Amino acid sequence: MRPALTGFSKDELTALVQEWDQPPFRAGQILDWIWKKKVGAIEEMTNLPAALRDKLAAEYRPHALEHTHTQGSADTTRKFLFKLHDGRYVESVLIPANPALYGEKSDRRTLCVSSQVGCAYGCKFCASGLAGFSRNLDPSEIAGQVLAAERLSGERVDNLVFMGMGEPFANFDHLMAAIEIITAEWGLHLGARHLTISTSGLVPRIRDLADHPQQIRLAISLHGATDEVRNKIMPVNKKWNTAALFEALDYWNSRKKQHLTLEYILIQDVNDDLEQARILAGHARRLTAKVNLIPYNKVEGLDWVRPSETRCKAFRDILKNAGVSATLRLEKGHDIDAACGQLRLKQETEEGIIEAPVKAR
Ligand code: SAH
Ligand code: SF4
């Protein structure tokens, strides 16, 4: 398969055009067509010599993703399904920050980006982990999701969260190469502060990101305040337990100014005990972290249930009363399968690429 141009850094593309006896500025022109003018085809790069266009088109594809499906519509949460060159699927979700109440456009947009096809970490509540791990996305497929979302919506994406399918830290090198493209002036030129990586707790990579010079934000999928609860639902905790995780988060705080976010899905009778809220409050205070409470989104094939609204609010209030900044997202997105991984799971199951998930509970 011809590689896609959306995976190239400026240095790599400069080396390529020089190999073809072209002046280095051609690399800048190509990047401008891809990332700024957002063209669909190499033939549209009209300031390149025809011979260079032909050679490029013979050996490279402009884009890595083929858009096959959109759920939702403008000013609501929109979910894009993309087909990859090997027939697999990934999805990205575009979320307006302030959904318009009276028909005006929302002012900020966040894109939820996938990093892998499937996930090897097998959290018991998650659609992405259900069918296991297939493969890493390459930088052209990761950065390409942002470009595709902008081309499809005709809107600028303001914030990125790496909270789609996959464990971004298990695909660290491709992730960081994609982030270089996304943040570069010649690329999408999004500020690192507008990027948040979410991890289930890969301790060595948390430390690596803490040492990284860019001010990228970090969110931790905690989902349990103790080893006892975390071990039940997140196998990753057997490798790096909460003590190891919190030690890495202390290291993060010693290196970074940005506050951490702790994500906590609320699942009835699994982790919604109010004692968990009290312990969580202690951790969050010590780490000066924000807590995002997310009532569990139904996943087809799994029997977990979201707690009552009363219980969710009681859980939040314990955090708030302890002086922790906590948000409870009683979000609407789940009516279009907003928990990432579900649209792809449906598509790939229908096509017989993967087997229908078996109930884990
Ligand atoms: N692997 C990374 C990033 C992808 S998951 C991680 O785990 O952090 C992104 C977020 O979606 C995680 O917090 C994850 O726990 C959450 N999530 C997974 N399944 C969910 C569900 N059914 N309902 C609500 N959130 C879910
Ligand atoms: Fe993987 Fe994250 Fe889902 Fe866990 S929650 S299975 S780490 S994608």
Image (cartoon, rainbow, N blue to C red):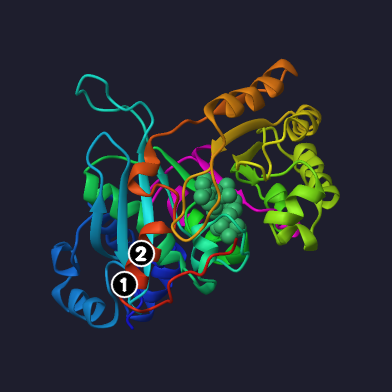
Question: Which amino acid type is marked by label 1?
Answer: Glu
Q: Which mark is residue 134?
A: none
Residue highlighted by disc 2? 346
Where's the C terminus, which quadrant?
bottom right
Magenta stretch encompasses residue 238: no
Secondary structure of the residue carrying tag 1 is helix
Residue 42 sits in quarter: bottom left
The residue positioned 57% from the left and 26% from the top of the image is: 327
The residue positioned 29% from the left and 66% from the top of the image is: 63
Magenta segment: 180-204
The residue positioned 76% from the left and 28% from the top of the image is: 281
The one nearer the camera, 137 or 308, is: 308
Magenta stretch encompasses residue 182: yes
The reply to whether discs 2 and 1 touch (Cβ–Cβ < 8 Å) is: yes
Residue highlighted by disc 1? 350
Residue 77 sits in quarter: top left
- Residue 146: percent from left, percent from top: 36, 52
- Residue 153: percent from left, percent from top: 23, 45
